[in-house]
């Protein structure tokens, strides 16, 4: 009896293992067949993007069955098809993330209050999605685009608007173009002429050196946000034309990384995240506003973080750098370059005491201590504890002491 039972058990086990082996073999064969046929075995609903959607796209293109809406989120089809038509891949080094959601584009134009007759400087035109909306409002747009491939395709796409002079496209790096524009303005003032053999960007800068704008709108690469803001802040009078009240408009609308946008707009003196850039914005802007958050899926390719639209209302540099004491003789004692250099130096080591961050080759230790005493600042004050007015006041006092010491030496 026992031998018959054991033989039956062993036969059942062997049959079970063989069936299991056959099942696994068929499963592996099925997966192999699926891979050969070009299917991933994952079913997705329309408008949902998965981690391996790019591989699906490649397989679909090989079968001539590529439809972006099947593998990418809604709102991207036109931009994706356009980029594939010109055989374009976004460059990570340039921080290229194109806005593709029509609702967001419409919202940006609405919040920016772009209307007919406005002259707008757009930084980074990309595929022209935002440009179309601004042109549709009747604005005159000047675009600055760095990427060679996008510049060429953009000019072909918007040829009619360029011919009608409603749109001007400049092929240049924005920071270099702004510097060349500034130099061109100086040379025009001095009456000198440009030599032969200049680059296309410099010639465009010479032609546009006298042009001023009502608004600046930009979908910025996140890696140039700080550099561009530092350049724009003290140049309200140079970049913006005067409104009816005789004051430059100074309206700057930027698409930034959401975390940076909240830090720049919502941090105040005393906060742990208060930085040198906050001091400069508080000084040069009469108003700053976080407008709305933008989901990362509104961009293509999608970045790793959400974005946000912010608004900065720039002040004329003379008004921004006016002495906090209101003394007229001090009005232009401090230049924009001096102020930015001083603030950046004070924040060079954020956790250290302010007095220890100011090098002696800039201002001697005794002058720093005396100026802080005059300003009623504690000797242990740290950089994030001071407001922009206190920084400006401290710099004025230090300049006065330095000028006084120089006159005594003479």
Image (cartoon, rainbow, N blue to C red):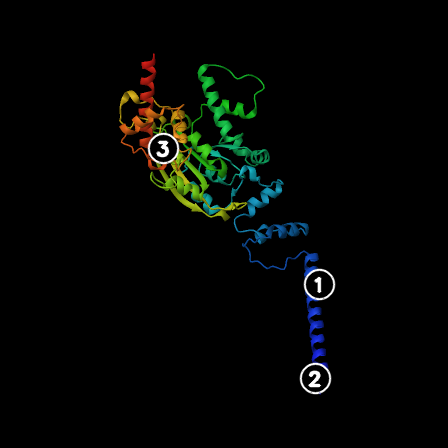
Picture coordinates of residue 259 (x, y %)?
Answer: 43, 44
Picture coordinates of residue 212 (x, y %)?
Answer: 43, 27
Name the residue rendered at 47%, 48% in the picture: 295
- In the picture, measured across the screen, residue 30 lies left or right of residue 81, that is right
Name the residue rendered at 38%, 28% in the picture: 358
- Residue assigned mark 3: 354
- Residue assigned mark 2: 5
- In the picture, measured across the screen, residue 272 lies left or right of residue 177, that is left
Nearer the observer, 211 or 194: 194
Neighbourhood count class around disc 3 (C-alpha, 10 Å): few under 14, some 14–19, many 20 upward: many
Instruction: In the rendered view, tell whether residue 31 sits above or below residue 273.
Output: below
Quadrant in the rendering for residue 3: bottom right
Circle 2 SS class: helix
- Is residue 222 visible to us here? yes
Name the residue rendered at 31%, 33% in the picture: 379
Point out the residue furthest to the front here: 366
Lower position in the chain sequence, tag 3 or tag 2: 2
Foreground mark, 1 or 2? 2
Circle 3 SS class: helix
Picture coordinates of residue 229 (x, y %)?
Answer: 43, 33
- In the picture, measured across the screen, residue 2 lies left or right of residue 264, that is right
Circle 1 SS class: helix
- Residue assigned mark 1: 29
Quarter that holds the N terminus: bottom right
Picture coordinates of residue 61 (x, y %)?
Answer: 65, 49
């Amino acid at each position: 009896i026992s031998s018959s039972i054991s033989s039956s058990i062993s036969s059942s086990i062997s049959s079970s293992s063989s069936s299991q082996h056959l099942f696994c073999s068929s499963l592996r064969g099925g997966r192999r067949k699926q891979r050969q046929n070009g299917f991933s075995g994952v079913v997705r609903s329309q408008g949902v993007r998965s981690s391996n959607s790019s591989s699906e796209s490649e397989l679909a293109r090989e079968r001539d069955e590529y439809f972006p809406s099947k593998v990418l989120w809604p709102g991207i089809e036109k931009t994706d098809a356009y980029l594939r038509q010109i055989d374009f891949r976004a460059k990570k080094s340039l921080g290229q993330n194109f806005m593709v959601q029509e609702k967001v584009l419409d919202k940006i134009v609405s919040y920016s209050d772009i209307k007919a007759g406005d002259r707008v400087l757009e930084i980074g035109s990309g595929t022209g999605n935002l440009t179309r909306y601004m042109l549709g409002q009747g604005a005159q747009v000047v675009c600055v685009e760095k990427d060679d491939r996008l510049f060429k395709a953009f000019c072909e796409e918007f040829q009619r608007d360029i011919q009608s002079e409603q749109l001007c496209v400049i092929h240049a790096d924005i920071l270099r173009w702004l510097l060349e524009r500034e130099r061109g303005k100086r040379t025009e003032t001095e009456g000198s002429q440009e030599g032969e053999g200049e680059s296309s960007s410099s010639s465009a800068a010479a032609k546009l050196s006298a042009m001023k704008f009502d608004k600046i709108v930009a979908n910025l690469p996140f890696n140039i946000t700080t550099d561009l803001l530092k350049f724009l802040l003290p140049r309200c009078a140079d970049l913006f034309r005067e409104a009816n009240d005789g004051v430059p408009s100074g309206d700057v609308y930027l698409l930034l990384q959401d975390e940076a946008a909240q830090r720049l707009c919502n941090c105040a003196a005393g906060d742990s995240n208060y930085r040198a850039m906050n001091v400069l914005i508080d000084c040069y802007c009469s108003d700053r506003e976080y407008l709305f958050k933008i989901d990362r899926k509104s961009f293509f390719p999608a970045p790793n973080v959400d974005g946000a639209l912010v608004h900065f209302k720039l002040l004329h540099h003379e008004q921004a750098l006016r002495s906090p004491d209101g003394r007229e003789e001090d009005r232009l004692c401090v230049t924009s370059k001096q102020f930015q250099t001083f603030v950046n130096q004070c924040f060079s080591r954020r956790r250290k005491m302010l007095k220890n961050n100011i090098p002696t080759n800039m201002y001697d230790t005794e002058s720093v201590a005396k100026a802080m005493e005059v300003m009623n600042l504690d000797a242990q004050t740290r950089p994030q504890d001071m407001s922009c007015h206190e920084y400006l006041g401290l710099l004025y006092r230090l300049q006065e002491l330095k000028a006084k010491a120089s006159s005594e030496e003479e």
